[in-house]
Image: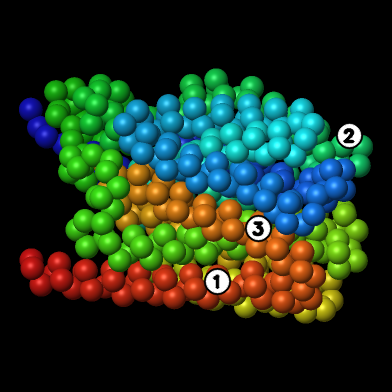
Amino acid sequence: MRTLDVHPIIDNARFSPFHWMVMAWCGLLLVFDGYDLFIYGVVLPVIMKEWGLTPLQAGALGSYALFGMMFGALLFGSLADRIGRKKGIAICFALFSGATILNGFASSPSEFGIYRFIAGLGCGGLMPNAVALMNEYAPKRLRSTLVAVMFSGYSLGGMLSAGVGIFLLPRFGWESMFFAAALPLLLLPVILYYLPESIGFLVRQGRSDEARALLKRLDPDCDVRDDDLLQASDNKGKGASVLALFRDGLAVRTLALWLAFFCCLLMVYALSSWLPKLMANAGYSLGSSLSFLLALNFGGMAGAILGGWLGDRYNLVKVKVAFFIGAAVSISLLGVNSPMPVLYLLIFIAGATTIGTQILLYAGAAQLYGLSVRSTGLGWASGIGRNGAIVGPLLGGALMGINLPLQLNFIAFAIPGAVAALAMAVHLLSSRRHGLATAAQA
């Protein structure tokens, strides 16, 4: 009887149709997740008018879902390390889809906010689990690229939300945007049937037969026998305690990652919540303002794929530093009076370097932490970052409430990009020092 480590088999596997399947289902989940998250920015101009909301009230209402996402990421990230990725994903998907449908029946801002909070719990929990699952199945040489491609489903969901809004809002009202979430819920049984469980989790649970079957599907040529004893090398038995995120020289990198998540999500949600309204106030029609949201998300998808490709070939942290600098510059220029093609280009770059970099942050966090705490690490990074997502809409509402010039609004949105670039530079230095210290001890 042999003892086999499952991770070298997964790391060195050839890219196969099985990888395509995992990436496609996880990506589809994030399409629905992105739709639910960006829907608020799409309906915001309409509900502000219907319910007579001030900019500050609208910003606070937009933060309800993001409060939910913070708690959802912390709760379901740790929970999935105990019950499995698949169950965690199923619970989160049902939660945010059901609550989004109920949003269409809301008759007051307070009722609307409660449903958005519940939807946020599911959205916040699904992201780290989907990233962790894709990261665990991806071959090592393609890991950043595959996670980025999968996560581009999030941007597709934002594009879908803007596109559906352009069609539905003038014809059927804002409620129809939320009722459309019933369609993805019908796919839940199909997704659960085809989506595989984490192999590492199955090994930890002693479900070796299921793990062997998945390894054979992953790599039909792998030499795994029925009597082989399977193990996961990065499962060190430390459980899912958050303290594990600060052991083994990870403390500085964990804190830098949390700060970068905070700043990045602040920019993403400030832009996604207020870009249509800011542009409408600047004189653009509602349809044009929503098309800016499309450009933002299209840029996010392109930036994630390009960044993942660059990260696999060079250094993922260096790529994130460069992207954050690009975010600070492009967002600060959005308030300058520019020709329409230049404005669309700047919004595209802003999306690539904010939404795209958020996706790269998830990919980097998944690679930083071992299997036994991966969902915990992703969940806490995402949960801490959600504070930035909460601040984003509130900041936009506060800035609009004091009637600042358009350019100053965008400069305020750009400052976190510079802070995040510094945080990732510290992360890079800490990683190099830890690598040197480890090499000296060897």
| Vertical relation: 154 (above or below) 406 | above
Image-based side of 139 in relation to 353, left or right = left
From the image, tell me which residue sits under label 1. Answer: 417
Looking at the rendered structure, the kind of residue marked 1 is Gly
Which disc number belongs to residue 394?
A: 3
Report crowding for label 3: few under 14, some 14 to 19, many 20 or more residues within 10 A (C-alpha). Answer: many
From the image, tell me which residue sits under label 2. Answer: 172
The mark that comes first in sequence, 3 or 1, is: 3
Q: CA distance from mark 2 to mark 3?
A: 28 Å
Residue depicted at x 28% and y 29%: 202
Name the front one of labels 3 and 1. 3
Q: Position of residue 160 (x, y in %)?
A: 72, 44
Q: Position of residue 85 (x, y in %)?
A: 40, 33
Which disc number belongs to residue 361?
A: none
Toward the viewer: 24 or 18? Answer: 24
Give SS at disc 2: helix
Toward the viewer: 63 or 264? Answer: 63
Residue depicted at x 37% and y 34%: 79
Name the front one of labels 2 and 3. 3
Give SS at disc 3: helix
Q: Position of residue 93 (x, y in %)?
A: 55, 31
Toward the viewer: 346 or 279? Answer: 279
Give SS at disc 1: helix
